[in-house]
Image (spheres, helix red, strand yellow):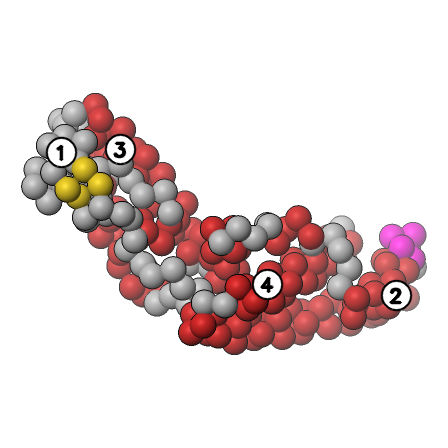
Amino acid sequence: MQNVTSCWNCGKSVEEVHFCEACRSLQPPATNYYDFFGLEHKLNLDLEDLEKRFYTLSRRLHPDVYFRRSEQERQYSLDASAILNDGYRVLRNPVTRAEYLLAEEGFDSAGRKSQNVPPELLEEVFDLNESLEEFRQGDESVRPQVEAAERHLFEKREEIDRELESKFEEYDRTKSRDILMEIQGLLNKRQYIRNLIEEIEKELVG
């Protein structure tokens, strides 16, 4: 959670995330999404609770509430509204939530490594690329192979999602950076598989 600071308006100590307890002035918004929503830094979140917090904060921080207040508070309200929407979008999705927490913990973005072929998929990807090239050249006979490869990749992605669920629980219990490293590897693999699925869908539809 955000550290104790002083209110920009009255100078009293501020422990609440968004408001000064003494003068009720709106404070500079926390930039960390977990802190902004008043949540523990975890990978498993109660999505119903997150949604309730989102709508409560939407009402309390909306710029219309501050149109008669100081320029400072009007700006803080605009900043807070932007963080609120971005944070909700990121935290409600387990994949983007994990990527965000990894970044906060100093890990590289998963997407940067998504072009590296996972070793266990090398042969499969080689065969898929051959089939896709033949399909692009008009060979409809390979369509069943391409569709089968797509189904298999969907299964692989679902398998990774199950692994992520298990690793999320393990991280929340242990706060181990080794577990975060494993999660990063799973996210890299998932992103690569997602890219392959999108490529296949583009060819089958196009």
Q: CA distance from mark 1 to mark 2?
A: 67 Å
Contact between marks 2 and 3 (CB within 8 A): the answer is no
Q: Residues within 10 Å of mark 4 (few under 14, many from 20)?
A: few
Q: CA distance from mark 3 to mark 1?
A: 17 Å
Contact between marks 1 and 2 (CB within 8 A): the answer is no
Q: Name the residue rendered at 52%, 55% in the picture.
A: 102
Q: Name the residue rendered at 47%, 51% in the picture.
A: 104
Q: Position of residue 156 (x, y in %)?
A: 68, 72
Q: Which residue is mark 3?
A: 76
Which amino acid, mark 3? Tyr
State the predominant SS element of the stretch in magenta: helix
Q: Which residue is mark 4?
A: 181
The reply to whether the magenta stretch includes residue 79 is no
Which amino acid, mark 1? Gly
Q: Name the residue rendered at 56%, 75% in the picture.
A: 162
Q: Nearer the viewer, mark 3 or mark 4?
A: 4
Q: CA distance from mark 2 to mark 4?
A: 30 Å
Instruction: Give the mark, 3 or 4, whose residue is nearer the N terminus.
Output: 3
